[in-house]
Amino acid sequence: MKPPNPWEIPGHLSLSKGNGGMDKLCVQTPWSSAEIYLHGAHVTHFQKKGEPALLFLSEKSQFTPDQPIRGGIPIIFPWFGPRDGLPASGFARRTLWEIQETRLETNHSVRIYLKLPTLEFFEVDYFITVGETLTLEMRIKNHADKDFDYENCLHTYFKVSDINTIRIAGLRNARYDDKVTGSGAIETAEVLKVDREVDRVYFDNTANITIQDPGFDRLIHIKKSGSNSTVVWNPWISKSKHLSDLSDHDYLTMLCVESGNVTKNKVSLPSEKFAVLKAEYSTTPLG
């Protein structure tokens, strides 16, 4: 007989082997289901009962220890984007995280506490709560005797019905850098439409974001705190064909809206202080 796993919660949380033989946590609640890989502390699936999945996951994603998973919610830390001689967007999404605690809450949601291991000068704790909503909380504490500068981001891939009909609200009047055109501007649109490659970093944007998806008849709500940046990304046609872990047409059913603190909004954390990045994802009917 298989010995009981101390992290499992009968009927609610089990630990099993996922793609590539990697360990994953499978969660069931009265409202939803979820999957979390310990590789990257990566939430790859969240779905409310009776609804399409909230998160997009590429069928071509490489589930290997040295590569991040394409889709779901990768953790970007401690830097955003490329670094010479270092892994793009940090090491957190390529690291095997450690389980610290699993707990069934009184409201029957499931809370999982993971930690980024073997860090000398700072610690990173990650709390995932699965219930009627999906809540992610990343806590970073600086143990060095000087300020610790970092960037972090929850690089969330949302599953959408058709990118041509999607609208994004909550970005108006925010200044952004456009990485496609190399220019910057202030967002004037009340709702943002994606009809080409988009790769924008919106600065000093603390507003909650809403994604309107008429094909799935739902609104996706992103309620965030400790986040001064919002990143919007869709690779569109040409870039999708150059990404080995995306299918050519995946851009039609995915949209990244990311909460964090990047580039101009990087965090400078004083010694023995901590900072929290939190995002809660929920859905309501569009009508």
Image (cartoon, rainbow, N blue to C red):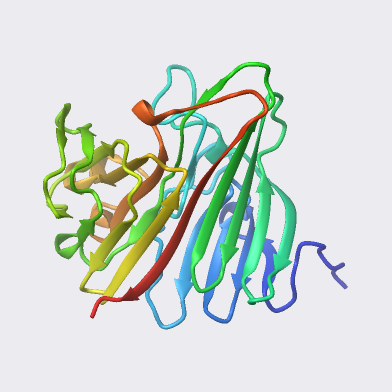
**Looking at the picture, how far across and down is residue 252, in whole percent?**
22, 59
Q: Is residue 257 left or right of residue 88?
A: left
Indicate whether 103 appears above or below 83: below
Q: Residue at x 52, y 75 (%)?
A: 32
Q: Is residue 205 left or right of residue 46?
A: left
Indicate whether 248 appears above or below 272: below
**Looking at the picture, how far across and down is residue 164, in whole percent?**
14, 61
Q: Is residue 106 left or right of residue 91?
A: right
Indicate whether 129 appears above or below 63: below
Indicate whether 89 appears above or below 271: below
The N terminus sits in image quarter: bottom right
**Looking at the picture, how far across and down is residue 93, in whole percent?**
53, 40
Q: Is residue 138 left or right of residue 157?
A: right
Residue 74 visible, this orientation = yes
Q: Quadrant of residue 276?
A: top right
Q: Residue at x 62, y 67 (%)?
A: 26
Q: Residue at x 36, y 27 (%)?
A: 263
Instruction: Give the camera-side residue of 45 and 114.
Output: 114
Instruction: Give the camera-side residue of 269 and 138.
Output: 269
Q: Quadrant of residue 212?
A: bottom left
Residue 59 visible, this orientation = no
The mark total stands at 0
